[in-house]
Amino acid sequence: MQNGPAEVTIIGVAGRDDADAMAAFVEDHGVSDIVHISDEELIIWRELGITSQPAWAYVNDDGTVEVEQGALGEEGILAKMNELAAA
């Protein structure tokens, strides 16, 4: 993701599929510039209360987590990154 603040790190967490499917998604959608991990057993999803894709979990410096279900698009992602970086 370009033009985002340096203080924000994006990690893609793929669930409900295997690592090969995640790698294909990353390649197909051109999002190889962020870190991706596979959560095949939905451990991270359950911990954060995520029930479906897409979802966004924001972990602040103090460890608090905010989860938002639904698609954001690049503009929405950059807006949220800027909001978090300014906090």
Image (tube, rainbow, N blue to C red):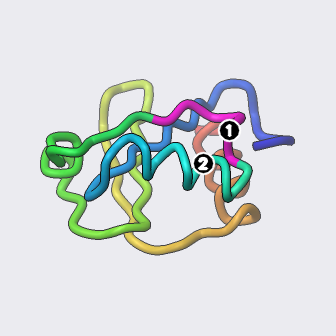
Name the kind of residue labelled 2 in the image: Val
Mark 2 crowdedness (10 Å alpha carbons): few <14, some 14-19, many ≥20: some
Q: Is residue 85 left or right of residue 66?
A: right
Return the residue at label 1. Answer: 32
The quadrant of the image that shows the C terminus is top right
Among the 4 quarters of the image, the one containing residue 33:
top right
| Secondary structure under the numbered disc 1 in the rendered image | loop
Q: Main secondary structure of the magenta part?
A: loop
Residue 68 percent coordinates (x, y):
39, 64
The quarter in which the N terminus is drawn is top right
Q: Indicate which disc residue 49 carries.
A: none
Q: Going 67% across and 57% down the picture, which residue do you hit? A: 28
Under circle 2, the secondary element is helix
Of the numbered discs 1 and 2, the one sitting upstream in the chain is 2
Q: Residue furthest right?
A: 3
Using the numbered discs, state the Cα–Cα distance from disc 1 to disc 2 in whole angstroms: 6 Å
Q: Is residue 33 magenta?
A: yes
Residue 76: where, in percent of width, then height? 67, 65
Q: Is residue 3 above or below residue 72?
A: above
Give residue 17's position: percent from left, percent from top.
30, 55
The residue shown at (55%, 51%) is 24
Q: Position of residue 5 (x, y in %)?
A: 75, 34
Which residue, given by chain and number where applicable, does mark 2 sit on?
26
Q: Residues within 10 Å of mark 1 (few under 14, many from 20)?
A: some
**Number of numbered labels in the structure image:** 2
Q: Is residue 37 magenta?
A: no
Q: Which residues are magenta?
A: 31-36
User: Is the Cβ of the residue at disc 1 closer than 8 Å to that at disc 2?
Assistant: yes
Q: In the rendered image of this protein, does residue 41 appear above or below residue 70?
A: above
The quadrant where residue 40 appears: top left
Question: What amino acid type should be assigned to the residue bearing mark 1?
Answer: Ser
